[in-house]
Image (cartoon, coloured by chain):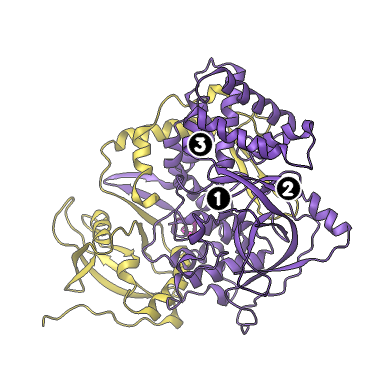
Chain colours: A yellow, B purple
């Protein structure tokens, strides 16, 4: 049997996690994704630098192969696509991605890592949200978004609301027109002039579901 | 997804090579939702998930920031994240712990700690218990909608456990009322909570895992129910008229109401007391909208248009009729109109039957419908769901009960 990739154990007392160093590849290259695994500790200062991947898991039975520490390894197809999109042309990119950085077959490790998840996201440089393959009308979506945000910031305010006992604190009316007297129908002049089809297309991506 | 983006210092979306700032993207969905009466309903359902995310992820304008959040927020978060995908449905509970700050300040409460050896039914049951007992409020239970009689305890679930694995299905599930406004009602106002089964982190079990023990009193028993409102009624005038007539007939039998009161009672009950999401309505507004709706049905041969279908020149009357229909759709859809033995009227879950108990429970913003389990000699009840009962939503019955120094009953929900 060919040699295969195997996870080395993590040290939970050191709040250790695995991160991937995703190897560089030319833009839209179809070559296999190569990664090296590193163990880092969230107790280290300065904090280890990594970006955390967020993506829709999709159908777990769809599999793809990537090279992990030199060994071809079977991973969920959705995680492979996300890594492929994020790899850089000329540099290593350090990424934490749950499907690969957590040994999903080790129930004990999985429970430990899931309990640490909040710290993993708090310590990240930023989250990379992979919405999926290119949007056919991405430019239009940007324009629609720009239109909405402009109108929104020009006409909105917000307030805080509490119940009688101070429970269920909620900020509501963040987008109420300033001249509204609470409740009531929004004014006709705020009718959006179009249907924002490109933006709706983005919202329908699996990541939001 | 909520946890990732709420905790991280920044988030960027990638769609092919195009980049979007996530928070801007989410705020735009809230803006569209705010225009609910002027956009297609299909856009509203599309915007629902991103707008829910905004509440959790937007540090500036969202509901709560990770620094400020707690178990209270946990209830809100798990309720909205149920619509999102997870590969392992137990993660709907486990993965949001960090989001609400529960992983800090020591240990994750025993009831909630990630344990992949527990069944989904047990994980959801324990999370529901934790939220209700820690918050001493039963608001979370509003998100439980049994789809039919067999569903109440299906799949090893206790009737009172939130089905986080299930996404909302507008063809079967009612909208929790009053439409996002958690704090509009307080049916149990005046009753003090005396927790009996508080569970401390790390303590030994001193409660039965499948039983949620709550206190309150029986307001009444259901005497008659109407059909549940469905799309069929909203699109077809004769069936809508017939359904309204059946509700009117029940009201005529309501001994508590005289003729004058009954018109308003019916108008208010069919919309669960509010005309618009996130706002209360005055009696005059409700009556006005309801009258406009009734005259519309008499004059026209079809139901009113939806608000977004009206053009800008539509008159005040048709606008009010459409507004009432939308409110009625939000409140009555997939719920039954009911009359109790002593003459209360209300809206209850689809599974409500004659003989079910209308109970005011401590910590419950609304009354609830319960069903006594036949086979038990204990006070075991199935939890059926929240309900609207006209005239008790602001704690009127609870204060009367308190003033009368009446004893509280124990209800063991199973």
Labels 1, 3: one chain: yes
Q: Is residue B306 left or right of residue A195?
A: right
Q: Nearer the viewer, residue A151 or B48?
A: B48
Lower position in the chain sequence, tag 3 or tag 2: 3
Q: Which residue is mark 2?
A: B393
Q: Which residue is mark 1?
A: B350
Q: Residue at x 17, y 73 (%)?
A: A70
Relative to B162, is B287 above or below? above
Q: Quadrant of the C terminus of chain B?
A: bottom right
Residue A146, position as x, y percentages in the image? 42, 33
- Measured in 3D between alpha carbons, the distance from the residue under mark 1 to the one under mark 3, in whole angstroms, is 32 Å
Q: Is residue A77 left or right of residue B152?
A: left
Q: Which mark's residue is nearer the viewer, 3 or 2?
A: 2
Q: Nearer the viewer, residue B169 or B129?
A: B169
* Magenta segment main secondary structure: helix
Q: Which mark's residue is nearer the viewer, 1 or 3?
A: 1
Q: Residues within 10 Å of mark 2 (few under 14, many from 20)?
A: many
- Measured in 3D between alpha carbons, the distance from the residue under mark 1 to the one under mark 2, in whole angstroms, is 20 Å
Q: Is residue A88 left or right of residue A142?
A: left
Q: Which residue is mark 3?
A: B31
For the record, the magenta segment spans B5-9
Residue B366 seen anywhere in this rendered image of the structure: no
Label count reads 3
Examine the image and state in which quarter residue A101 appears: bottom left
């Amino acid at each position: 049997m060919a040699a295969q990739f195997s996870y080395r154990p993590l040290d939970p007392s050191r709040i250790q996690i695995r991160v991937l160093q995703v190897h560089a590849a030319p833009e839209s290259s179809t070559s296999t994704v190569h990664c090296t695994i590193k163990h880092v500790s969230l107790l280290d200062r300065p904090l280890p630098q990594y970006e955390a991947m967020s993506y829709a898991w999709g159908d777990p039975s769809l599999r793809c192969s990537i090279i992990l520490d030199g060994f071809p390894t079977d991973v969920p197809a959705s995680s492979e696509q996300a890594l492929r999109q994020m790899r850089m042309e000329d540099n290593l990119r350090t990424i934490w991605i749950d499907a690969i950085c957590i040994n999903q077959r080790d129930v004990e490790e999985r429970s430990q890592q899931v309990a640490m998840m909040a710290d993993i996201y708090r310590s990240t440089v930023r989250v990379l949200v992979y919405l999926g393959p290119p949007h056919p009308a991405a430019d239009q979506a940007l324009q629609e978004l720009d239109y909405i945000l402009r109108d929104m910031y020009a006409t909105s305010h917000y307030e805080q609301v509490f119940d009688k006992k101070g429970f269920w604190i909620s900020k509501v009316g963040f987008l109420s027109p300033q001249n509204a007297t609470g409740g009531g129908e929004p004014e006709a002049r705020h009718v959006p002039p179009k249907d924002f089809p490109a933006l709706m297309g983005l919202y329908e991506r699996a990541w939001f579901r | 997804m909520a946890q990732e983006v709420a905790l991280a210092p920044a988030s960027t979306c990638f769609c092919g090579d195009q980049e979007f700032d996530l928070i801007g993207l989410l705020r735009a969905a809230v803006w569209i939702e705010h225009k609910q009466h002027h956009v297609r309903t299909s856009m509203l359902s599309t915007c629902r998930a991103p707008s829910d995310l905004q509440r959790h992820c937007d540090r500036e304008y969202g509901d709560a920031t990770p620094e400020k959040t707690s178990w209270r927020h946990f209830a809100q978060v798990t309720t909205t994240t149920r619509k999102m995908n997870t590969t392992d449905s137990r993660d709907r509970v486990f993965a949001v712990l960090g989001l609400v700050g529960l992983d800090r300040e020591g240990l994750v409460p025993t009831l909630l700690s990630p344990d992949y050896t527990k069944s989904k039914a047990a994980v959801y049951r324990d999370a529901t218990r934790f939220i209700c007992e820690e918050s001493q409020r039963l608001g979370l239970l509003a998100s439980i909608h049994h789809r039919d009689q067999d569903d109440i305890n299906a799949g090893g679930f206790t009737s009172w456990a939130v089905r986080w694995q299930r996404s909302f299905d507008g063809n079967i599930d009612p909208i929790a009322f009053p439409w996002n406004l958690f704090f509009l009602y307080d049916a149990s106002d005046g009753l003090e909570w005396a927790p009996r089964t508080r569970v401390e982190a790390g303590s030994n079990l001193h409660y039965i895992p499948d039983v949620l023990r709550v206190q309150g009193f029986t307001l009444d028993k259901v005497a008659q129910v109407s059909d549940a409102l469905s799309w069929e009624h909203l699109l077809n005038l004769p069936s809508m008229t017939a359904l309204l007539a059946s509700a009117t007939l029940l009201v005529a039998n309501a001994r508590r109401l005289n003729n004058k009161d009954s018109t308003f009672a019916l108008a208010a009950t069919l919309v669960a007391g509010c005309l618009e999401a996130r706002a209360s309505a005055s009696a005059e507004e409700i009556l006005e909208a309801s009258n406009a709706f009734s005259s519309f049905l008499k004059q026209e041969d079809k139901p009113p248009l939806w608000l977004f279908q009206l053009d800008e020149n539509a008159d005040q009357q048709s606008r009010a009729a459409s507004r009432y229909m939308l409110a009625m759709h939000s409140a009555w859809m997939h719920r039954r109109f009911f009359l109790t033995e002593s003459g209360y009227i209300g809206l209850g879950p689809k599974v409500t039957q004659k003989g079910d108990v209308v109970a005011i429970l401590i910590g419950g913003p609304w009354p609830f419908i319960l069903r006594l389990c036949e086979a038990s000699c204990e006070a075991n009840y199935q939890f059926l769901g929240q309900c609207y009962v006209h005239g008790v939503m602001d704690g009127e019955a609870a204060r009367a009960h308190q003033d009368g120094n009446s004893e509280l009953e124990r209800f063991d929900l199973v």
